[in-house]
Image (cartoon, helix red, strand yellow):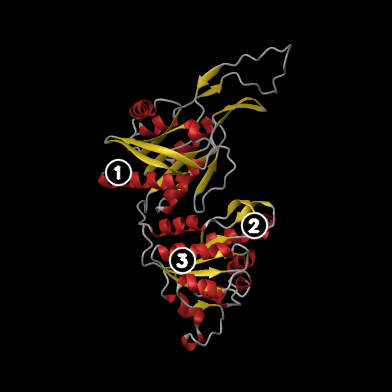
Amino acid sequence: MTLKGKKILLGMTGGIAAYKAAELTRLLVKAGCDVRIVMTEAATRFITPVTMQALSGQTVWTDLWDPRVSDNMGHIELSRDRDLILVAPASADFMAKTAQGLADDLLSTLVVARRCPLMIAPAMNVEMWQNPATQRNASTLRADGALFSGPASGGQACGEMGMGRMTEPAEVVADLQFFFQPKSLEGRRVVVTAGPTEEPIDPVRVITNSSSGKMGYAVARAAQEAGARVTLVSGPVALEAPAGVERVNVRTAQQMFDAVKSAVRGKDIFISVAAVADWKVKNSSRQKLKKVNGSAPHLEFEENPDILAWVAAQKNAPFCVGFAAESEKLDQNAKAKRLKKGVPLLAANLAQSALGADDNAITLYDARGKHSLGRGPKLEQARKLVAHLAGMLKKR
């Protein structure tokens, strides 16, 4: 999706991440955007309006009472022709004011008076981001329809580590691109499974498959971005559900199967990304197993239900997408799995190159053959996958 011709109002609040707004402005202008900048007084302490004016090629606005705006109504006029307001960086203070509808400077006032969508790129110390008040404000803003880009986790200017870094400018641009993309799954209802399952050996030990859940959560987000109503059935992972996505938490394969059977009724698309354990322990113990003279316990296994095959076999089944993580012979195994499961589309990758990583190299397999998505961030791969399946649905 191109951003050429899009009219963006970039709001800047006070914070060291203001330097990223300079690169963000450069990228937006390079992409063909009309960028109008509004800065809070605090933002001007970190980077000057002169710098932002040079990068945007336009006047930078800072004063609610600027007489250059007709009728002194900058809070009305400056946003009326905009396609979107992007606040980056967005401080904890700005988020709090916006969540409560406060309007005591130019930026906060025009945000309250806006007609266009609002996207927020938070930037603050990890403790500020995790503060319950900030989390309540973020939830309120999401409920009010605000979009979020980030924050990200990592090293911070204060020397601490954790969530709260402003998303990198290129990623903010990517989020804008996908906001403006056609809603290829508008009105569709989608169920996505993600993460591993855990099969108990005893109350403290399990067998499982290695999975961070990152790919499944990326697919859920990409489907939601494309306009779908998404239900995410998730095994145990350390991830937050994407905004606007309904999450159902499960632990075992049987629990995931039961949740999917309930969630998939009447849905249009089922995307099986979860790394479901193939077997469970038939003779699991209710008490913790003790070591006895160094001997290992005798475990008996039985197969778990094949969730994807069951969904695909239903009468009036949804459009089914499978995932395969292989260690060798990717083409051969992926093609065989697609036919065995009876699904129209299967995404496959080599497990050793993707487990726990933030990027992936995926190949899609359908009746027309194979389609490489190349290597890239998992969210980018998920968006390409969603675009491909949307195209297949359209041809149907």
Quick check: 29 left or right of 315? right
Question: Label 2: how many residues lie within 10 Å, few (<14), some (14-19) or many (20+)?
Answer: many
On the question of residue 122 being in view, the answer is: yes
Q: Number of labelled discs?
A: 3
Residue closer to the observer: 70 or 26: 26
Provide residue 198's location: percent of width, then percent of height. 57, 30
Mark 2 → mark 1, Cα distance in angstroms: 41 Å
Provide residue 36's location: percent of width, then percent of height. 47, 73
**Disc 1 target residue:** 392
Q: Quadrant of residue 348?
A: top left
Provide residue 151's location: percent of width, then percent of height. 57, 55
Mark 2 → mark 3, Cα distance in angstroms: 23 Å
Residue closer to the observer: 293 or 303: 293
Q: First in sequence: mark 2 or mark 3?
A: 3
**Disc 2 target residue:** 129
Q: Secondary structure at mark 3?
A: loop
Instruction: Give, as a three-letter code, the residue at label 2.
Output: Trp
**Disc 3 target residue:** 117
Residue 368, placed above or below residue 107: above
